[in-house]
Image (cartoon, rainbow, N blue to C red):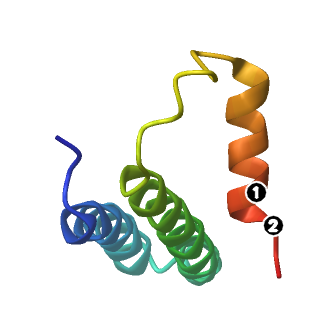
Amino acid sequence: MPRQRQQILDNLDAVYREAYERAKQGGDERRMFDLDAAYQREQLLLEVLLDIRDGLSGLKPAKSDAGGNPLAAIDTIRNLTRLR
């Protein structure tokens, strides 16, 4: 069973908070700025990945004619991600 969305986001937050606090204690403002930017970027990417995971987990099983066909899987993913 996949981990809960909030647990994953909390783990990301904990990792960055720890590194940020170390940089703060060391007076490394440049590192603090870099960590802040990296945290925001990674949080956004992680949320997108979690949305994809949640979307794919709600799909019905593929038709039996696809039967493990990798090209059919790629087509399914392409159709799911196509912007309309």
Q: For the image shown, how many numbered marks are present on the structure? A: 2
Q: Which residue corresponds to mark 1?
A: 79
- Classed neighbour count for the residue bearing mark 1: other residues with Cα under 10 Å, few (<14), some (14–19), many (≥20): few
Classify 64 as above or below 10.
above
> In the rendered image, which quarter contains the N terminus?
top left
Q: Give percent across and percent down for residue 78.
A: 78, 51
Q: Which residue corresponds to mark 2?
A: 82
Q: Give percent across and percent down for residue 57.
A: 37, 51
> In the rendered image, which quarter contains the C terminus?
bottom right
Q: Amino acid at mark 2?
A: Arg
Q: Could you tell me if the residues under marks 2 and 1 are in contact, i.e. CB atoms within 8 Å? A: yes
Q: Nearer the viewer, residue 69 or 15?
A: 69
Q: Nearer the viewer, residue 56 or 20?
A: 56
Q: CA distance from mark 2 to mark 1?
A: 5 Å
Q: Give percent across and percent down for residue 33.
A: 61, 83
Q: At 68% across and 60% down in the image, what residue appears?
A: 80
User: Under tag 1, what secondary structure?
Assistant: helix
Q: At 53% across and 60% down in the image, what residue appears?
A: 52
Point out which mark residue 14 bears.
Answer: none
Q: At 69% across and 45% down in the image, what residue appears?
A: 76
